Image: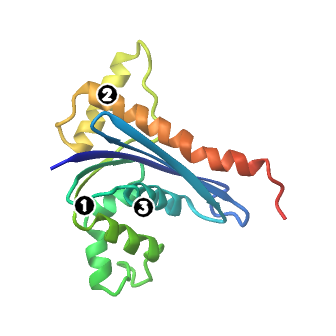
C-alpha cells in the first residue's frame, strides 16, 4: 500500500469578524516528491480553512487505496476522526451532542467522501511550534508531548520534519491572507 504524508494548516485573520480573510496550505509528500497547494476565502472561519486544506490535499490525489498519514494542528479536525464524532453526527442526522446542526456539514461530507477508500491516520501537531537551536531540553520535551499524543512510532528526526512541515503549511496558509490585506474592502 502506497503511503502519502499530508501536512495541512488553516488560518483566519479576524476570525469571527464580519470582514475577515482566511487561508489554507498543504504539502503532500510521496516517494521523495512534494506538492504544495494553498488558497483562501474572505468571510470564513479558521475551522473552515483547516477542513479546506485537507479537502484540497485529498482532491489532488489521483488514486484511492492509499495509506494517508495526515498531520494537522487542528484539534477540531484530528479529534473528529480519532474520536469518531462524524459517526455520531451521521447517526443523529448531522446534529451534534447538543442537538444542534453540525457546523461546516458540507465540508465534512465532502471530506468523508474523499477519504473513502483510503486508510487515513490522523496526527495532532502543536501549532506554531519552533524547535530551538541548542535548546535540546525544550525540544525533547516537545518531542515527548508529540509522541505521548500520537504514539511512540516517531523518531526525533521525524518529529523535527513534522514540525518543519507544519511551519511551512502555516506560511502557505498566510499567503492568501497577506495578498488580501493589500486589497481595500468594498
Q: Residue shown at 19%/42% (left/top)?
A: 151
Q: Quadrant of residue 5?
A: top left
Query: Which corner quadrant of the image does residue 165 belong to?
Result: top left
Across and down, in percent, residue 80 comes to: 32, 64
Q: Under tag 1, what secondary structure? A: loop
The label nearer to you, 1 versus 2, is 1
Residue linked to disc 2: 141
Q: Nearer the viewer, residue 72 or 68?
A: 68
The disc, 1 or 2, on the residue closer to the chain's N-terminal end is: 1
Residue 147 lies, in percent from the top left, at 24, 37
Position of residue 153 measured from the top left corner of the image (x, y, whole percent)? 17, 37
Q: Secondary structure at mark 3?
A: helix
Provide the residue designation for mark 3: 55
Q: Farthest front residue?
A: 62
| 164 over 27 or under it: above or below | above
Q: Bin the neighbour count of mark 2 within 10 Å (Cα to Cα): few under 14, some 14-19, many 20 and up.
A: few
- The reply to whether residue 121 is visible in this rendering is yes
Nearer to us of marks 2 and 3 is 3
Left/right of residue 172 with respect to residue 161 in the rendered view: right
Please state the total of marks drawn on the protein image: 3
Disc 1 residue crowd, few under 14, some 14–19, many 20+, Cα 10 Å: some
Q: Which residue is mark 1?
A: 64
**Residue at 22% from the left image edge and 54% from the top image edge:** 66
User: Vertical placement of 75 versus 7: above or below?
Assistant: below
Mark 2–mark 3 Cα distance, whole angstroms, equals: 32 Å
How crowded pointer 3 is (Cα within 10 Å; few <14, some 14-19, many 20+) is rated as many
Q: Are marks 3 and 1 in contact (CB under 8 Å)?
A: no
Name the one closer to the observer, 156 or 32.
32
- Image quarter for residue 78? bottom left
Amino acid at each position: 500500500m502506497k503511503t502519502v504524508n499530508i501536512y495541512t494548516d488553516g488560518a483566519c485573520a479576524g476570525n469571527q469578524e464580519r470582514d475577515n480573510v482566511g487561508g489554507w496550505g498543504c504539502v503532500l509528500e510521496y516517494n521523495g516528491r512534494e506538492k504544495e497547494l494553498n488558497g483562501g476565502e474572505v468571510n470564513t472561519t479558521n475551522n473552515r480553512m483547516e477542513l479546506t486544506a485537507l479537502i484540497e490535499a485529498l482532491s489532488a490525489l489521483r488514486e484511492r487505496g492509499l495509506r494517508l498519514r495526515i498531520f494537522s494542528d487542528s484539534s477540531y479536525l484530528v479529534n473528529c476522526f480519532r474520536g469518531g464524532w462524524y459517526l455520531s453526527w451521521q447517526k443523529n442526522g448531522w446534529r451534534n451532542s447538543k442537538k444542534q446542526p453540525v457546523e461546516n456539514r458540507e465540508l465534512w461530507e465532502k471530506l468523508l467522501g474523499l477519504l473513502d477508500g483510503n486508510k487515513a491516520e490522523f496526527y495532532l501537531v502543536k501549532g506554531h511550534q519552533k524547535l530551538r537551536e541548542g535548546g535540546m531540553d525544550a525540544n525533547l520535551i516537545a518531542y515527548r508531548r508529540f509522541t505521548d499524543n500520537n504514539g511512540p512510532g516517531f523518531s526525533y528526526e521525524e518529529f523535527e520534519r513534522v514540525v518543519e512541515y507544519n511551519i511551512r503549511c502555516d506560511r502557505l496558509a498566510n499567503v492568501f491572507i497577506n495578498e488580501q490585506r493589500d486589497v481595500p474592502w468594498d
